[in-house]
């Protein structure tokens, strides 16, 4: 099982925000799209960073409501871990668990082609392992 299998089912849409967008805009986008993190894209469409709900919560605790007017670049993580469509899902889950992040942008030939959350990966694996188990059970009892 590879990332490309997950993207085939969930699609390659990636919601992005500009580094100069405000934290308030970021919250609107997170709510509107029902996601927990956005890729921060630079003017050329490259990955400048990633920003998640967790960054907002931590910074809000430090700076209070003034944070809403601050630019996203002040709270984003700039050293972004990305994966390729060929990445094995088990290895990806291990990395996400060890490094304690729940989102990974997927990049192919320098272009952003999707994003996967730990929830997407777990759901895909459970669905497919259950289907495999059902087939084996049917085969054995068949
Ligand atoms: P998350 O668990 O994805 O909400 O993110 C937890 C923390 O890790 C936040 O500070 C994020 O900015 C950061 N983060 C999330 N995804 C990544 C990633 N793929 N690479 C590096 N940092 C990340």
Image: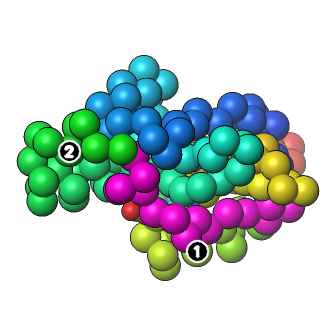
Q: Secondary structure at mark 2?
A: helix
Q: Secondary structure at mark 1?
A: helix
Q: Nearer the viewer, residue 64 or 3?
A: 64
Residue at 22% from the left image edge and 51% from the top image edge: 57
Q: Residue furthest right?
A: 109
Give the position of the C terminus as an image quadrant. top right
Residue 95 image label: 1
Residue 95 % position (x, y): 58, 74
**36 sits left or right of 47 in the view:** left
Q: Nearer the viewer, residue 5 or 20?
A: 20
Q: Is 81 colored magenta in this rendering?
A: yes
Magenta region = 72-87
The crowding category of the residue bearing disc 1, from other C-alpha atoms within 10 Å (few below 14, some 14 to 19, many at least 20), is: some
10 relative to 83, above or below = above
Residue topped by disc 2: 67
Residue 78 image label: none
Residue 131 image-quadrant placement: top right
Residue 136 % position (x, y): 80, 52
Give the position of the N terminus as an image quadrant. bottom right
Q: What distance separates the C-alpha of mark 2 from that of mark 1?
A: 30 Å
Q: Is 62 colored magenta in this rendering?
A: no
Tell us which disc is closer to us: 2 or 1.
2
Residue 93 image-quadrant placement: bottom right
Residue 40 % position (x, y): 55, 47
């Amino acid at each position: 099982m590879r990332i490309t299998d997950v993207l085939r089912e969930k699609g390659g849409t990636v919601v992005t925000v500009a580094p100069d967008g405000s934290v308030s805009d970021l919250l609107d986008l997170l709510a509107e799209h029902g996601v927990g993190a956005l890729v921060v894209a630079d003017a050329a469409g490259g990955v400048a960073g990633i920003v998640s709900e967790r960054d907002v919560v931590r910074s809000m605790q430090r700076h209070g409501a003034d944070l809403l007017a601050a630019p996203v670049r002040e709270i984003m993580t700039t050293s972004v871990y990305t994966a390729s469509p060929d990445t094995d899902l088990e290895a990806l889950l291990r990395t996400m668990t060890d490094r304690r992040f729940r989102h990974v942008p997927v990049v192919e030939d320098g272009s952003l082609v999707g994003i996967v959350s730990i929830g997407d990966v777990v759901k895909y694996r459970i669905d497919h392992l259950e289907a495999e188990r059902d087939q084996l059970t049917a085969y054995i009892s068949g």
